[in-house]
Amino acid sequence: MPTAIKISGRSGRNQLINDTYEPMQITHHDRPCWVARAVAPRYLFHSGKSRWVISKQIDDGARCWAYVQDSGSSQDPSSCPGPWTVCDQDNQWREDAAVKCVSVPADHDKFVQLRMTLDAEMRQYGLIDPKNLKELWKRLDYNGNNVVSLAEIDKMVVELVAGGTWPAWLNNKPALMRAYKKTILKDGDGDDWVERHEFHALLLNIFWFNKLWQVYEAVDTGHDRRMDIGEFMSGLSKMGLQLSQAEAQQEFASIDGNHGGQVLFVEFCAYVRKRVNPDDHPNFDADIVSGEHATRAVRNHRGHEATHEHVISKKCFRDFDELEKKIQATLANPRECRKLWTVLDFNGNQIVSLAEIDKLCVEQYPLLNHKPALMRAYKKAISKSGGGNGDDWVQKKEFKKLMAYIFYFNKVFWLFEQGMDSTDRRLNFQDFKKCLLVIGVKLSDADMRRDFSACDKNGGGWVLFDEFCAFVASKNCPQAMTDMLD
């Protein structure tokens, strides 16, 4: 029976090799191959000559992170006496006696096995071959600047699915957001862009988080993007769990960190990460941290060299208050609305994409250039609950709502990052009341309770972040809640 390989003991540069590598269904040079449990392009295989290597792709092993000399015709690097040789900080190769390589039983956990399907499926769609990756990157990076934004990634996914190149299950916005954040903040260098050398990791993450989203949606039978204890217990088998009622309640409590009675997709992803790679104990999961604190987290983990070129202008209430007045005035003036729409819809086709909206924020409203807030505002604007028609485009009549959502999603996001956050971006009544007072929405206590109940659609005692932002937009900028007319 195939066994897994556990690598441990490396510190400093290339400590990413520390992982458990599960057996793949393919061979390379007639030897077995293994892939890291952590959802990242890291492979353990034989070079075909005299080494077992760990590298980002299965090839001749000439460019790798670490290697060990083969003892002969071994079928498994754990039988090689070592030591392992690793590339150090000064780019010199040195033996590292601390690196250990042992054989361990393969893991049959549902999510470990789900992770093991990724490479085969990506190969099916031509996403492993370097030539195909190069062609797809050129399509994505159409301006040739070697970095791509979230908006460009979303556009690529929408087009590939619409054209039948990719299956429909790969086009889910919550999964795409998680894939993007993991790529830039955990796998990448902590900026807001996916660079060419991070592209393979991005594709792997897109497949992975969409698979997790399928499981999450299957368990979330209420389809409200919140999993309660009843749904969790009913969906145990879908998550590969066999637990008693008491064990299930204990497991749910461990996922629901703030004990609010509901599990969001991001919490579910964190739970799966611990199941897939329980030996991984990072100081933080950078892709769960956002905003101004993300750079601090990256710096704490990787040192100042990872962020020394980053310049972040600290936001303040005055900036938001001044811009709020300008946006309110624009949205109340039909002529100014049409002028701004013309800037956004520069090709005049009467619909705009996420990429075009992102371009407007970067160029016209740098204060609002916050990708997670922009993605949520866009999703709300195109949704039927937000005034859209459910397609992937913002039409002219939806433009006023879009602008209001972009502003207030950004403002509320910023407030949460300043300490208003309940860690999972959902609010009970006291949080709801506190945030409204800080933002400046003037309502009586009775009105606040009425509005809280209206936002809390399932009566669970919690209002989700998106619902709260849309509510604030409707209260502070009612002129935006009507359709834009020609």
Image (spheres, rainbow, N blue to C red):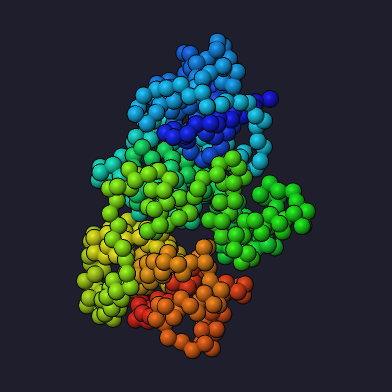
Above or below, comparing residue 476 to residue 175 in the picture = below
Give the residue at x 40% y 77%: 439
Left-right relation of 208 to 486: right
Residue closer to the observer: 90 or 269: 90
Q: Is residue 24 left or right of residue 11?
A: right
- Tell me if I can see residue 222 in this picture: no
Q: Is residue 131 left or right of residue 97?
A: left
Q: Position of residue 102 (x, y in %)?
A: 61, 26
> Where does the C terminus fall, quadrant-wise?
bottom left
Spot the residue most to the top.
72
User: Is residue 244 visible in this depiction of the protein?
Assistant: yes
Who's the residue at 74% across and 54% down the image?
Answer: 247
Which quarter of the picture shows residue 314? bottom left
x%, y% of residue 349?
27, 62
> Looking at the image, which residue is at 47% across and 73% down?
468
Q: Quadrant of residue 8?
A: top right
Which residue is found at the position 57% from the left and 33% from the top? 20
Q: Nearer the viewer, residue 301 or 28?
A: 301
Q: Is residue 352 above or below residue 203?
A: below
Percent from the top left, x then y, of residue 138? Answer: 31, 39
Picture mark count: 0
Quarter of the picture holding the N terminus: top right
Relative image position of residue 218 (x, y in whole percent): 62, 55
Quadrant housing residue 252: bottom right
